[in-house]
Image (spheres, grey):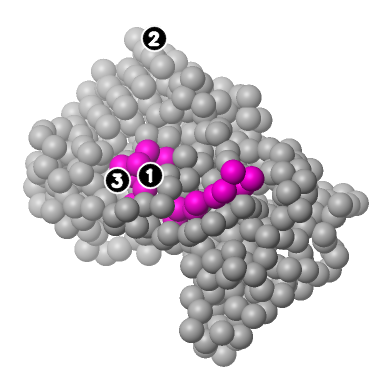
Amino acid sequence: MNLVAILLAGGQGSRLSILSQRRAKPAVPFGGAYRIIDFTVSNAMHAQIPALGIATQYKPSSLMEHFGTGEWWGYMGRGRVARILPPYTGEADSDWYKGTADAVWQNRQFIQRFHPDIVVVLSGDHIYYMDYLQMVDFHVKSRADATVALQEVPWEETSRFGLVQIAENGRVTAFQEKPKSNPVSNLASLGIYIFNADILLRRLAEDAADPTSDNDFGKNILPAMQAQDRLFGWVFDGYWRDVGTIESYWQANMETLDPSSGLDLARWDVRTNYFDPRPGNDLPARICRGGRVRHSHIARGCVIEGEVENSIVFPGVHIGRNSVVRDSVIMNNCEIADDCLVDRAILDKDCVVDRSSRVGAGDNTVNKEFPHLLDSGITVLGKNVLLPPGTVLGRNALVFPGVRPEDLPGSEIESGATVRAAKPLW
């Protein structure tokens, strides 16, 4: 049985705010050493899927650089093929992918060149470990034309998901897209699909010819297949997280510190591209005299002179004397000087928090400009932010990339504030 996988990695991830402002959501760093897309690609590697196409669109450069030729995941040599499939562009922007189904349809030549029996369609913006071959086995034994991966979610959260109702044998009987009330079930679609190749291409062609379609799997393709084909649901009971919001991203990072959460990086054998142009990051991490680390990930190249607790610290970070980093995600090459406090914060790459500063101080006032993004006390700094000595930055604050001392309204920035650079970084 010949398998081909298409991984959809073109999403903007707008709810991740400045973390995905200049990179695709699947390229956002995660867990001290990885990017979000690494989890799906590693799953495909473990399943020995021989051909993998990665459909990109929004801000794809960092994702393309990270994936390279796929060699870090074993996609090299005879019989193993992985390709970045750049956005298809014609004469107008409207020729870009109109939806998830359109992204697969426009890359049908990649699928057809391998003459597959089965096409696996994946999303590159979730954190999970899954044996795709178990789902393929269910698909074949059920004599399905298409199979959707499902997972039970709390009833109070059903409004966030596309829901699927299934019969006892697993056959899909109803779809419901993010219902505000009266959910048909609490089985949520995980955005992982298996199709018989011939039927998929036929349904995609019909959908592409329909001018009223949104060209989306969840909205169009799967509901149509329910009426015309054998569509089944496969219930997955392992760890799966949609890290599409600041809070869910922060929470999933924290769960990497607790294997009992189900997120077990060592057992999952997640692969990544470890290349970094700064050779200093290849040095071992150093915990200095007076430094303390508790319940945290400390990556290579870090120098810890202060105290780190319950935090994820990416490569090349320096934390100065008498500084405390707590419940935070600190990305590559950040500098936290002496006598600082960073509490419940996310710092993107290359930030500087100068001496005697406080990040994440004060009450839990929601962000005034983005209340739907920052309301749980997490403070976020974008890339290349420089906070001068003595800065106090409140909770739920959002500091855009490239902010310099002259952009700040003062030495104390209240909780819920948003600060932008007068001269944007990009």
Q: Nearer the viewer, residue 270 or 155?
A: 155
Q: Amino acid at mark 3?
A: Leu
- Would you say 226 lies left or right of 175 here? right
Q: Which mark is residue 18?
A: none
- Would you say 95 lies left or right of 344 here? right
What's the residue at 64%, 45% (across, down)?
169
Q: Which residues are magenta?
A: 153-170
Secondary element at image label 1: loop
Dot 1 alpha-carbon crowd within 10 angstroms: few under 14, some 14 to 19, many 20 or more: many
- Residue named by callout 3: 381
Secondary element at image label 2: loop
What's the residue at 11%, 33% (across, down)?
362
- Quadrant of residue 422 in the image? bottom left
The quadrant in which the C terminus is found is bottom left
- Residue named by callout 2: 289
Q: Amino acid at mark 1?
A: Asp
Q: Nearer the viewer, residue 417 or 407?
A: 417
Q: Are marks 1 and 3 in contact (CB under 8 Å)?
A: yes
Q: Position of residue 258 (x, y in %)?
A: 46, 21
Query: Is 216 located above or below residue 235 in the figure?
Result: below
* In front: label 2 or label 3: 3
Q: Position of residue 80 (x, y in %)?
A: 83, 51
